[in-house]
Image (tube, rainbow, N blue to C red):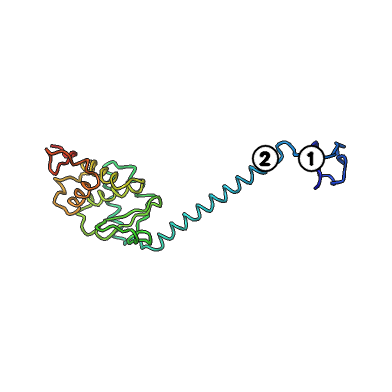
């Protein structure tokens, strides 16, 4: 092993007894670890491995995302317009956080990707993939909704999933904010979507339906 002078850092011949530059005594120096000499090297190795690990994880996630995009189709032009109009309703009603998420971070798809195909729920109007911010919008979303406000209610629900909320949280959020949205029993009570969502909200958030003095026990309904 070559001898590195601890005084001037010159690498000397392993047989040298003193440093050729500064004449420092090199006897046994090769067997004496230099204080702190290996620390930068160890830290550098750890950092390099951490960077490689992070890069691999990002590449895997990106590949996973692309696989879901490439195994599903884009929406038709007229469907995209309806989505934009519904998001416009949310913007008008003051749901700024959801609007930003739906406008700039969400990728809309027309049918199930390979992951959704294995976990699809019946009677769903849309489905999301968190944290990839992918929303699959099914044909029933366009067929059965009465207007842009009703489509906005569904998007408001799905936006909660895009933020990581579960079904209970998503149903409860929309139901509590339906008056702010302008989607109420008076305006949409006869629609298929409104009736289905109320029934599903009772299933996922029964705590909202324990008030006997209101219709269907709805505690959020103003008398």
Determine the CA span between mark 2 and mark 1. Answer: 16 Å
Q: Residue at point 27% right, 52% down? A: 85
Q: Residue at point 63% right, 42% down? A: 43
Q: Residues within 10 Å of mark 2 (few under 14, many from 20)?
A: few
Residue placed most toward the observer, 155 or 7: 7
Q: Residue at point 35% right, 56% down? A: 108
Whether residue 72 sits left or right of residue 123 in the image: it is right
Q: Secondary structure at mark 2?
A: helix
List x then y, in percent, for residue 148.
23, 51
User: Which residue is labeled 2 in the image?
Assistant: 39
Residue placed most toward the observer, 50 or 34: 34
Whether residue 15 sits left or right of residue 218 in the image: it is right
Whether residue 50 sits left or right of residue 195 in the image: it is right
Q: Residue at point 80% right, 48% down? A: 1
Q: Residues within 10 Å of mark 1 (few under 14, many from 20)?
A: few
List x then y, in percent, for residue 62.
47, 55
List x then y, in percent, for residue 214.
12, 40
- The earlier-in-sequence mark between 2 and 1 is 1
Determine whether label 2 and label 1 are within 8 Å by CB: no
- Dot label at residue 125: none
* Pair 2/1: label in front: 2
**With respect to residue 157, does 19 lie above or below?**
above
Q: Secondary structure at mark 1?
A: loop
Whether residue 105 sits left or right of residue 45 in the image: it is left
User: Which residue is labeled 1 in the image?
Assistant: 9
Quadrant position of residue 135 = bottom left
List x then y, in percent, for residue 117.
34, 61
Q: Quadrant of the C terminus?
A: top left
Residue placed most toward the observer, 38 or 154: 38
């Amino acid at each position: 092993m070559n001898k590195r002078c601890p005084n001037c850092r010159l690498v000397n011949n392993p047989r040298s007894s003193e440093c050729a530059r500064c004449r420092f005594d090199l006897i046994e120096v090769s067997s004496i670890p230099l204080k702190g000499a290996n620390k930068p090297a160890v830290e550098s190795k750890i950092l390099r491995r951490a960077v490689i690990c992070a890069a691999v994880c990002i590449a895997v996630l990106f590949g996973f995302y692309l696989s879901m995009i490439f195994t599903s189709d884009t929406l038709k032009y007229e469907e995209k317009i309806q989505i934009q109009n519904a998001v416009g309703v949310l913007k008008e009603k003051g749901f700024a956080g959801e609007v930003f998420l739906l406008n700039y971070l969400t990728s809309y798809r027309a049918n199930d990707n390979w992951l959704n195909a294995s976990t699809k729920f019946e009677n769903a109007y849309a489905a999301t993939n968190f944290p990839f911010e992918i929303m699959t919008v099914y044909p029933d979303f366009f067929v059965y909704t009465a207007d842009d406000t009703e489509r906005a209610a569904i998007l408001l629900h799905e936006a909660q999933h895009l933020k990581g909320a579960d079904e209970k949280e998503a149903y409860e959020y929309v139901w509590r904010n339906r008056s702010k949205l302008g989607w109420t029993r008076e305006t949409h009570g006869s629609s298929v979507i409104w009736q289905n969502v109320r029934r599903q909200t009772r299933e996922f958030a029964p705590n909202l339906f324990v008030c006997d003095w209101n219709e269907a026990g709805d505690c959020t309904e103003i008398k």
